[in-house]
């Protein structure tokens, strides 16, 4: 039976339109928590404020779990709730920007490619996480050894990766003489548009030179900076929202009130007026991306590894410890801010203060374990690029060094109390092999630094860097994370 959360909800802002108003003009790959609370919500606010008809076809490519979400959305007439949780007040919004949804396990691969190739579609956007780009994290180039890319290459009409889907759909459009779509990356990857372009063109070149040329000539890949803290939903979140809403919504998501979206205005086939909903269109997004990746995400990773090791389950818990709070602030202002070149009016100290406030929000249960995931994909842009800057400028980077050592200690897979850590990372097996050889000793550092997909080739050659990481790692072994953070 279809569940009508709009009529059942007792306590929420709700759309006064139905999906009939919408045309699928955007296909979104990766209908996870972040997308539901970010781009889909911006597009919903555009629908509220204008006579727009821009709607989404949501696509999840990966797991069975994702397929369940797609089924649930359909059950709920493509409506779901976003709970914006401030320190004391929660605002519920029912989001009405989704028109339809597809999953390869339910609808088949071809249905998705056809949707992406359909004339009404003008944008294909993505939130597929860092590893979804199948690129080498250190260089940003397509990793042709990635098993998903291997499948894309052997069966281009039955792709596996998001990059493979985009390339195959663009091929159909070029063959049918249809206009291209814009590829809009919304992931936390430095120069995300350029990485998406590298990956799509890299794959197309290996498949079909003519297609690669058509993509080069016709498709744009704007960069974006996306920001909103959206913890993965738990049963607890869902029941809390159900209580407020008056009905159970299996697709609901909770997040902070803050949101930001800075977009390079480079669309080949039209776009919604996202500026009406508070997005900022600029010529060059890269400085904003770097600011956010280094100041927000960099300190998030620092707090996640050292916080988890220190026994804290959530970011807001770590922030109750004044040493962690002070260290996060110092990391942002003393070691990340100086590496940035921002437009004149940017106030980085105010940005840092605001981040500290956002991290402190006790009603957001953002797990340190969740942020600790996929460190191999996150470390380069969050902590290693800034270290390279400090080495060049001969300045102090002890917070960054402790953050990197914290990651190394975390991937040991056992915490300071000897309990198992569930390490989730595409390179988890590599870490396990290294730790099996060395155990919890400082000698692991050399082998971890030798993973060039993360560290590249230059940093591990720098004796000062190696010494700094070894000393921070040894300190974690000797006195533990809480004391090491206190001593910074
Ligand atoms: C976090 C981000 O999980 C993580 O790695 O740092 O998801 C972070 O919450 C968002 O980028 C905030 O915009």
Image (spheres, rainbow, N blue to C red):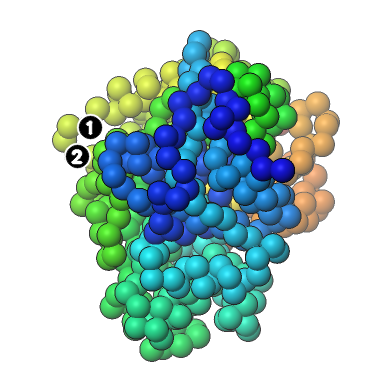
Q: Nearer the viewer, residue 90 or 166?
A: 90
Q: Is residue 358 left or right of residue 268?
A: right
Query: Visible in this render: residue 297?
Result: no
* Residue at left offset 36%, top offset 28%: 334
Q: Position of residue 356 (x, y in %)?
A: 44, 21
* Residue at left offset 35%, top offset 78%: 178
Q: Which residue is mark 2?
A: 343
Q: Element type at marker 1?
A: loop
Q: Is residue 108 above or below residue 451?
A: below
Q: How many residues crowd mark 1 within 10 Å: few (<14), some (14–19), many (20+)? A: few
* Residue at left offset 62%, top offset 71%: 109
Q: Nearer the viewer, residue 92 or 436?
A: 92
Q: Is residue 143 above or below residue 32?
A: below
Q: Which residue is mark 1?
A: 346
Q: Is residue 460 above or below residue 122?
A: above
Query: Visible in this render: residue 101?
Result: yes
Q: Is residue 31 above or below residue 5?
A: below
Q: Position of residue 351 (x, y in %)?
A: 33, 26
Is there CB contact under 8 Å for labels 1 and 2?
A: yes
């Amino acid at each position: 039976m279809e569940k009508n959360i709009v009529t059942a909800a007792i306590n929420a802002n709700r759309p006064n339109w139905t999906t009939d108003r919408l045309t699928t003009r955007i296909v979104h790959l990766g209908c996870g928590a972040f997308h539901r609370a970010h781009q889909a919500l911006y597009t919903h606010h555009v629908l509220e404020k204008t006579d727009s008809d821009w709607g989404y076809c949501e696509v999840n490519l990966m797991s069975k779990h994702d397929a369940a979400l797609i089924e649930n959305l359909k059950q709920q007439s493509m409506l779901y709730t976003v709970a914006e949780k401030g320190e004391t007040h929660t605002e519920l919004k029912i989001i009405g920007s989704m028109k339809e949804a597809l999953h390869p396990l339910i609808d088949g691969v071809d249905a998705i490619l056809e949707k992406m190739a359909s004339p009404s579609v003008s944008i294909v956007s993505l939130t597929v996480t860092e590893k979804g780009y199948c690129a080498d994290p250190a260089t940003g180039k397509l990793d042709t050894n990635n098993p998903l890319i291997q499948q894309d290459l052997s069966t281009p009409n039955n792709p596996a990766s998001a990059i493979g889907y985009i390339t195959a759909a663009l091929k159909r459009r070029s063959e049918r003489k249809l206009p291209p779509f814009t590829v809009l990356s919304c992931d936390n990857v430095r120069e995300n548009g350029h990485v998406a372009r590298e990956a799509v063109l890299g794959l197309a070149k290996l498949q079909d030179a003519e297609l690669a040329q058509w993509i080069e000539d016709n498709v744009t890949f704007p960069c974006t900076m996306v920001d909103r803290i959206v913890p993965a939903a738990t049963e607890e979140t869902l029941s809390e929202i159900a209580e407020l809403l008056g009905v159970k919504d299996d697709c609901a998501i909770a997040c902070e009130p803050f949101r930001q979206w800075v977009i390079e205005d480079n669309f080949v086939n039209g776009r919604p007026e996202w500026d009406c909903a508070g997005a900022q269109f600029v010529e060059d997004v890269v400085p904003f991306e770097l600011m956010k990746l280094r100041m927000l995400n960099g300190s998030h990773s620092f707090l996640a590894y050292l916080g988890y090791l220190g026994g804290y389950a959530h970011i807001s818990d770590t922030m109750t410890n004044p040493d962690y709070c002070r260290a996060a602030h110092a990391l942002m202002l003393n070691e990340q801010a100086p590496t940035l070149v921002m437009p004149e009016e940017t106030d980085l100290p105010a940005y840092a203060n605001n981040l500290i406030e956002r991290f402190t929000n006790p009603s957001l249960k953002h797990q340190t374990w969740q942020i600790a995931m996929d460190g191999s994909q996150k470390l380069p842009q969050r902590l290693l690029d800034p270290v390279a800057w400090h080495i060049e400028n001969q300045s102090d980077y002890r917070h960054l060094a402790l953050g990197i050592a914290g990651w190394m200690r975390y991937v040991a897979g056992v915490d300071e109390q000897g309990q198992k850590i569930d390490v989730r990372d595409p390179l988890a097996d590599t870490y396990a092999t290294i730790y099996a050889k060395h155990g919890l000793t400082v000698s692991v550092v050399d082998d971890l630094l030798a993973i060039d997909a993360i560290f590249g080739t230059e940093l591990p050659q720098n004796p000062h860097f190696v010494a700094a990481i070894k000393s921070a790692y040894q300190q974690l072994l000797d006195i533990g994370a809480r004391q090491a953070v206190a001593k910074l």
